[in-house]
Every structure is written in C-alpha cells, then in structure tokens.
Image: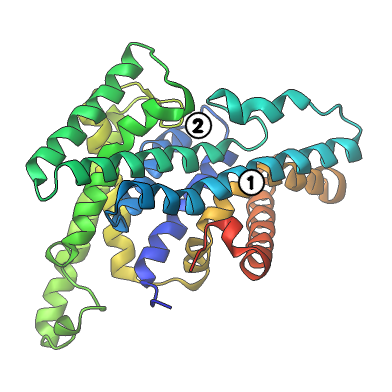
C-alpha cells in the first residue's frame, strides 16, 4: 500500500474538525460565518491533489465507487438510524425524507453533509472532461474553469438553482483545479519540507532561515484571511449562497486554504488530528445524525445546561462515536466508506 503523506492527513483532519464545529455552532455566530468562508473550498482543493485524468467512462466508474456508493449508503443508513431513534423516543418519523435523494433538493433533512459527496463527484467528472478535451493546454483549461466558476457565481446572484448541487459544483470547480495544479508543482511552493531528502542535507543555519520564512508566510496568510473574511458576507457552498464580490469570495477562500495547507505542512503530524483526517469521509457522513445521540446523552444522562462545558461534551461525544464507527467500517465495510484498493 502506498505510504500516506502525513501533512495531507493533518490538513484533512483540521478541515473535518472545522466542519463539525461549524455545524455545532449556532447559525448566526461570527466564528461559524468565518469557518464557512473556506472550509468546504478546502476539501475541494484537497480532492484536486489526487485527480488522475482517465478515460471518461473509467473515471466515472472509479468515482462512483469512491463517492456515490458512500453517498447512497450513508443516506439510507441515516434514514434508518433516525427512524429507530424516533421510534425509541416516540416521535413520529417523517417518511417523506426518504425521497429527498431523488428530488435534487439542497437539504437532506437527516444527513445534510452528504451534499458534498455528490457535488464532489460532479466537480471531479466535469474537471476530467475539461482535462480530456484540452490535454496539455493549461491556459485553455484554466480559462474554462474560471468561466464555469464565474457562471456558478452568476447563478447565485440571479437566484437560479440547479438541482443536485450542479450550481455549487460550478462555483467550486476553481478550487479543485488550483488544488490539482498546486500538488503537481508542490515542491515549488513549500519553503521547508521534511519529506524531501535534499532539504534534509541543508546546513542548520540555512534551515533556520527557511523555517522563519515558512512561519512568516503562514502568519501573512492568516492576517490576510482575517482581513478578507471581514469583507466576505454569508457564504454557504451547499446552497451556492455567496453574498459578496466573486474575487473576495475566492480570495478569502484561498487565503484560508493556503494558511491551513502551509501550517499543516510545517507541523507535519498531530496523531489524533491525522487519525481524523484518515477517516474524514466517515466523520463527514455520520456526524450530523449523531448529534441526536449526543444531545440525548447530554439531556437525559449528564443533564448539563447550555454552556462551554455543554459544547465541549458534544464535541467529545461526536468525535468518539465517529471514531468508533470509522473503525467498524474500516474493518468490516471499507468499500462503503470509499476505501477501494
């Protein structure tokens, strides 16, 4: 099996923690708004790292196994889980939610984050088509991606919704494209990388200088992100809601993305967060349904009122349950979690 790159798992782990926290926070909080400016673009960007152009039919089959199979499995698993929970708590289950997967709606009542798997499938297939029809023509590829991304943004401003998150896929295509190019040329961007053997031979004084440059760039990106996020409005990629100028939108997202990428590359590994990164698909697909269990645990067992302790307990319970489910799926049903050898 190919060795995993630690800092990429750390990026994914950081991203999935932001996703869970973003969903736990009240809707109108400033921290949640800031997280939403870049956390899903980060995952599209990361997905672009591993894009391998293939014949279109072969590519669709591959992405169907890795994205659509988990999409369908976790949708119906969540429906069954909520039905059992409602039966246990004597609440009337809303059977109409079973049809949401076939209607192209933007909100899966019992498992909202699954939108990302379908949207990522569309982004990846669309990008593969662009690569195949314009092989080796980077300028044309980039121009097509930019036009489509701006097109998705225009659809938002004219309130034109395309079912099955197609408008969101258009808006997000640029992050996937830049992620693909970035990873392909990553050695040009990383000031210091412990994974590259030639960097290990540098003199210690030179390495310290490089280290300061790396941390200086990280600090600059963080300040730039905070500045731009103040101009970015309410952003929700799922519903293709972008309430700001297009260039503020992508500028804020990329500042946040590169801040996280370079920070995680510099740190390289934090064991627990890397673990979350390795299991990010499962955590993304189960954490919202598990809110029911976390709330029940708090309300009827711990009985803690809403407070910092309450939110901390919810986060710990959610990640503990997600980790347990991830281990079960890794051992008994890895393919349902998108892990195909």
Relative to 74, 83 lies left or right: right
Q: Which residue is drawn at 52% across and 26% down?
A: 106
Above or below 219: residue 203: below
Q: Depth check: 141 or 198 in front?
A: 141
Q: Position of residue 279 (x, y in %)?
A: 53, 61
Q: Which of 50 and 65 is in front in this view?
A: 65
Label 1, on which residue? 74
Residue 37 seen in this snapshot: yes
Give percent across and percent down for residue 22.
Answer: 51, 41
The local secondary structure at tag 1 comes to helix
Q: Position of residue 16 (x, y in %)?
A: 49, 52
- The answer to which quarter of the image holds residue 167 is top left
Q: Name the residue under label 2.
A: 29
- The residue sitting at 50% across, 64% down in the picture is 340
Question: Tag 2 or tag 1, which sits nearer the N-term?
Answer: 2
For disc 1, the neighbor class at 10 Å (few under 14, some 14 to 19, many from 20) is some
Question: Element type at marker 2?
Answer: loop
The N terminus - image quarter: bottom left
Residue in the picture at 10% in, 50% down: 136
> How many numbered marks, from 0 up?
2
| Camera sees residue 227 | no
Q: In this view, does 73 lie above or below 267?
A: above
């Amino acid at each position: 099996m190919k060795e995993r790159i630690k800092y990429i798992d750390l990026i994914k782990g950081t991203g999935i923690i932001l996703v869970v926290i973003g969903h736990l926070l009240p809707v109108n909080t400033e921290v949640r708004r800031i997280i939403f400016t870049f956390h899903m673009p980060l995952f599209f960007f990361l997905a672009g790292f591993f894009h391998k152009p293939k014949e279109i039919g072969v590519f669709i089959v591959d992405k169907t196994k890795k994205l659509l199979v988990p999409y369908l499995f976790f949708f119906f698993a969540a429906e069954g889980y909520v039905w059992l929970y409602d039966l246990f708590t004597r609440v009337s289950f809303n059977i109409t939610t079973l049809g949401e997967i076939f209607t192209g709606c933007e909100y899966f009542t019992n498992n909202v984050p699954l939108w990302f798997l379908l949207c990522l499938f569309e982004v990846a297939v669309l990008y593969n088509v662009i690569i195949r029809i314009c092989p080796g023509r980077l300028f044309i590829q980039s121009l097509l991606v930019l036009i489509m991304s701006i097109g998705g943004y225009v659809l938002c401003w004219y309130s034109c919704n395309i079912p099955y998150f197609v408008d969101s896929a258009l808006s997000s295509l640029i992050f996937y494209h830049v992620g693909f190019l970035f990873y392909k040329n990553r050695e040009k961007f990383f000031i210091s990388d412990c994974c590259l053997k030639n960097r290990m031979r540098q003199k210690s004084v030179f390495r310290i200088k490089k280290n300061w440059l790396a941390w200086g760039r990280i600090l600059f990106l963080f300040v730039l992100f905070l500045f731009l996020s103040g101009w970015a409005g309410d952003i929700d990629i799922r519903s293709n809601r972008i309430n700001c100028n297009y260039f503020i939108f992508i500028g804020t997202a990329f500042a946040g993305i590169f801040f996280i990428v370079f920070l995680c590359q510099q740190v390289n590994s934090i064991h627990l967060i890397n673990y979350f990164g390795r299991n990010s698909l499962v955590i993304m697909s189960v954490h919202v349904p598990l809110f029911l269990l976390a709330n029940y645990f708090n309300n009827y067992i711990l009985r803690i009122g809403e407070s910092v302790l309450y939110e901390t307990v919810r986060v710990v319970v959610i990640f503990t349950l997600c980790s347990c489910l991830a281990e079960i799926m890794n051992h008994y049903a890895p393919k349902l979690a998108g892990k195909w050898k």
